[in-house]
Amino acid sequence: MLSSIYNDLKAEFSYGNKVNQLVIINVAVFVIATILNFILFLSNGGKTSTIFESLIKYLAMSSDGMFVLTHPWILVTNMFLHLEFFHILWNMLIFIWFGRVTGDFLGNHRIVFLYFCGGLLGSIIFFLSANLLPYGANGTKMALGASAGIMSIVVAAGTIAPDYSFRLLFIGDVKLKFIVFALLIIDLISITSNTNTGGHFSHLGGAIFGFIFVRLLQEGHDLSLPFNRMAEYIQYLFSSNKASHRRNNPLKVIHRKTSTKPKNTSEREVKGGNSLDHQTQLDQILDKIKQKGYDSLSDEEKEFLFQASKK
């Protein structure tokens, strides 16, 4: 059974989308931490192990500036660390729901960048708030979890497709902009009520990055491009089949010879008889979704959007 589960997860991680890959990493870290905590708990006579607490300290984000400087990896490790079942369950469900929407509209290759940079800005906002506001005065604070990176993706989805509808249990269809707004209000209420104050400041940091990223992307500035090029290069270096990897690289530049013959309308036509170029057609589909919702798209438009999301 375990080997079957491992093979399924390995196949999904190798060929699945970026949301599924990040979910698998988060769940794997949670399972390993839970098992380790259980073993140390038993070996310590049924008491919480100080070894486990020390390990968490070296993986979670800290409000201690010197500790962050001497342990810089915590800026990354904290966004994959969960210790409570309902914490990771809620985070991963939101990630799957909103991550797929964001991937459809912005492209699967931008998910990891949003997750990392949203999580990083969330850690920075947590650190600043813990050192500048009274709640951080009573000892060193720690933050952990994927929430900031996920909030970056949630707000990105709400910014690019505010009128996209989710069907909620007992409520019905609700537009994405209202769900995102409600989540942000919950963060603000939690901050003012001193409920996990640092964590909710971290959420706001992720939300800010998601909004800024989409607005810049709409203006033609893709912040993820250098990150994705570097990731592709690293993947290329470790690829066993470099020729195949180069052919499948979605970020490669293709040089074509310029034809001396004037192009007519038929030469510019795209599949389905549409004379609009790819970007124009994509923009029109996104505008249609904003105005009428995703369900208003035809099957051909949904297929076009799905193919565009993989580029």
Image: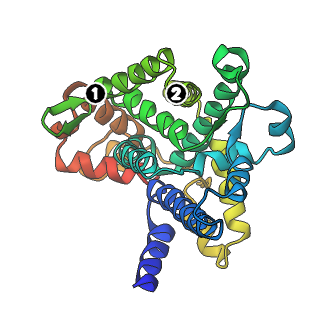
**Image: 238 above or below 124:** below
Q: Mark 2 to mark 1: distance in Å?
A: 29 Å
16 lies left or right of 32: left
Which percent across, then down, holds residue 303?
27, 52
The residue under label 2 is which amino acid type? His
Q: Provide the secondary structure element on which disc 2 rests.
A: helix
Horizontal side of residue 226 vs 84, given as left or right: right
Q: Residue at x 71, y 42 (%)?
A: 75
Q: Work out whether 75 lies above or below 188.
A: below
Q: Left of 56 or right of it: where is 250?
A: left
- The spot of residue 174 in percent (x, y) is 20, 30
Q: Nearer the viewer, residue 213 or 188?
A: 188
Can residue 273 be spotted in the picture?
A: no
Question: Of the residues tagged 2 and 1, which is closer to the observer?
Answer: 2
Residue behind mark 1: 290
- Please say if 149 is above or below 199: below
- Residue type of the residue flagged with mark 1: Lys
Element on which disc 1 rests? helix
| Residue at 17% from the left image edge and 44% from the top image edge | 298
**Residue 72 horizontal/vertical position (percent):** 80, 44
Task: Verify CB contact (< 8 Å) between mark 2 and mark 1.
Answer: no
Q: Which residue is mark 2?
A: 200
Quadrant for residue 129, please give it. Answer: top right
Q: At x 16% / y 33%, what residue is drawn?
A: 173
The one nearer the camera, 67 or 284, is 67
